[in-house]
Amino acid sequence: MKSGDHAAIDVPAESSAAVKGKAPLIASQREEKRGLNRGFGIADFLLRLGAIISTIAAAATMGTSDETLPLFTQFFQFEASFDDLPTFLYFVIAMALVGGYLLLSLPFSIVTIVRPIAVAPRLLLFILDTVTLTFATAASGAAAAIAYLAETGNPNTNWLAICDQFEDFCSTVSGAVVASFVTVVVFVVLVILSGFALKRQ
């Protein structure tokens, strides 16, 4: 071989049959991704419906918590109501806002079912769900702390337990707090689902 000669390397061209064989595989992977994301969207929609029910139940239950003791006179009346405590009032307002957000988010959740590859609506829901989760957790935690004090009291701060007298009031408040924590758990699942779906985009 002369020094001026150049060695030619033959690279076999990919056959058209191989290219055609890859096309169905790629299409199958896309359909699989679309199907899985659509499943995430359906689960997201159903979870939002469940969260709406628990949120409305929490707000309505707390909003109707009111008890008057049968022992009262013309000048004294012993009554316990949710609006006597700013924390419970904040709880009702917060749960109402969370429920309103969940209702408004349903159309975006439907979009993720109809267009499972769309990133924008899922990303928007992911961000807003995270913010709402923080808001709902704060309201639920604050209400749970006050409900615990009403149940057990605190002798160090002269906070007397009132649930021995206002049993119906305390049980109603406890039910509202439990319903709100159900909403918080649902929001955690929603955020996790959105994160998985975004990762697969």
Image (cartoon, rainbow, N blue to C red):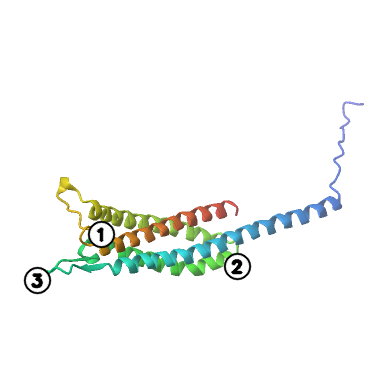
Amino acid type, mark 3: Thr
Element type where label 1 sits in the image: helix
In the displayed structure image, the side of residue 50 where residue 37 appears, left or right: right
Residue lying at 48% horizontally and 67% vertically, measured from the top left: 49
Element type where label 3 sits in the image: loop
Q: Which residue is mark 3?
A: 73
What quarter of the picture does the C terminus occupy?
bottom right
28 to 8, vertically: above or below: below
Q: Which residue is mark 2?
A: 114
Name the residue at the left extreme. Answer: 75
Q: Residues within 10 Å of mark 2 (few under 14, many from 20)?
A: few
Q: Position of residue 71 (x, y in %)?
A: 14, 68
Q: Which residue is mark 1?
A: 87
Amino acid type, mark 2: Val
Name the residue at the right extreme. Answer: 1
| Quadrant in the picture for residue 10 | top right
Residue lying at 82% horizontally and 55% vertically, measured from the top left: 20
| Quadrant in the picture for residue 67 | bottom left
Mark closer to the chain start, 2 or 1: 1
Report the mark closest to the observer, 2 or 1. 1
What quarter of the picture does the N terminus occupy?
top right
| Quadrant in the picture for residue 54 | bottom left
